[in-house]
Every structure is written in C-alpha cells, then in structure tokens.
Image: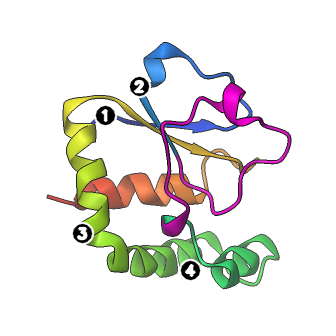
Amino acid sequence: MDIELKRAYDSPQSKDGYRVLVDGIWPRGVSKEEAKIDEWRKEVAPSSELRKAFHNGSLDWSGFRRRYLKELTSYRESLRDLAQRARKERVTLVFASKEERRNNAEVLRQYLNMLK
C-alpha cells in the first residue's frame, strides 16, 4: 500500500496523489483552494471525547491508539474503498496536528494497512 501522511499546513505537491483530510474539523487558516483536498473523511476522525482525552494528557498514546482502532472498526466497510485506492495509487492522509508521529492519521494508516 502507498499511504503517506502530511500536515494540512504543508504545501500540497503532485506526488501526494489522492489527498484525504482525516480530521473532524477543517484546519484553521487553510483555505479549501490551497489545501487541494480530494476528499474529506471527517466521519473517521477520532470522537471528540477521545481527541480531548489524548490532547489534555488523560490518555497516553497507547490508550489513544487502542481506543481509536476500536472506533475505526465501525467504519471498516466504508474504509475498504480507501484501502483499495491505496493499493493502486498513492493516498496521502492529511491532518492538522502539530504532532507528526503520534496522531490520528498514523493510526488510520495502520488500520488501512490491516484491511484486506
């Protein structure tokens, strides 16, 4: 699978392929024109409760990852098409978090790689 991750604040490039925003809220200060998003999958973003628990420190990375993977199971069927696309072309999961390694897009990439 060819799945990359990229912050919404980084400039889009042609090598990004199909760009999918995976946050529940549009990134502050980024226009739709400059973001060049092909699809917005806000429904697969972590729940507000989960996101807030992780950001305020009451939930560590391991706990966040485990709970988010559980949430993603309810979107398994709707995510199959994205996984299939990533088998054929590059898909870039776009996210707004300042944390580039421990974020929802990273967990979603792991989940998509598990889908058959």
State which quarter of the image contains the C terminus. bottom left
Q: Disc 3 to disc 2, how far (Cα)?
A: 22 Å
In the rendered view, tell whether residue 13 sits above or below residue 85.
Answer: above
Q: Would you call the spot at circle 3 few (<14 residues within 10 Å), some (14-19), or many (20 or more)?
A: few
Residue with the mark numbered 2: 17
Which region is colored magenta?
A: 21-43
Name the spot of residue 39 as percent of width and height, x first. Answer: 48, 44
Residue with the mark numbered 3: 77
Would you say the residues marked 4 and 1 are in contact, meaning their CB atoms lie under 8 Å apart? Answer: no
Residue 23 drawn in magenta: yes
Q: Secondary structure at mark 2?
A: loop
Among the two numbered marks 1 and 3 on one chain, the one whose residue lies closer to the N terminus: 1
Give the residue drawn at x 76%, y 84%: 58
In the rendered view, tell whether residue 5 sits above or below residue 62.
Answer: above
Would you say the residues marked 1 and 3 are in contact, meaning their CB atoms lie under 8 Å apart? Answer: no
Q: Amino acid at mark 1?
A: Asp
Give the residue drawn at x 77%, y 70%: 55
Frontmost of labels 4 and 1 is 1
State which quarter of the image contains the N terminus. top left
Would you say the residues marked 3 and 2 are in contact, meaning their CB atoms lie under 8 Å apart? Answer: no
Q: Would you call the spot at circle 4 few (<14 residues within 10 Å), some (14-19), or many (20 or more)?
A: some
Name the spot of residue 9 as percent of width and height, x first. Answer: 74, 33
Name the spot of residue 57 as percent of width and height, x first. Answer: 78, 77
Q: Nearer the viewer, residue 11 or 110?
A: 11
Among the two numbered marks 4 and 3 on one chain, the one whose residue lies closer to the N terminus: 4
Q: Amino acid at mark 3?
A: Glu
Q: Nearer the viewer, residue 24 or 102?
A: 24
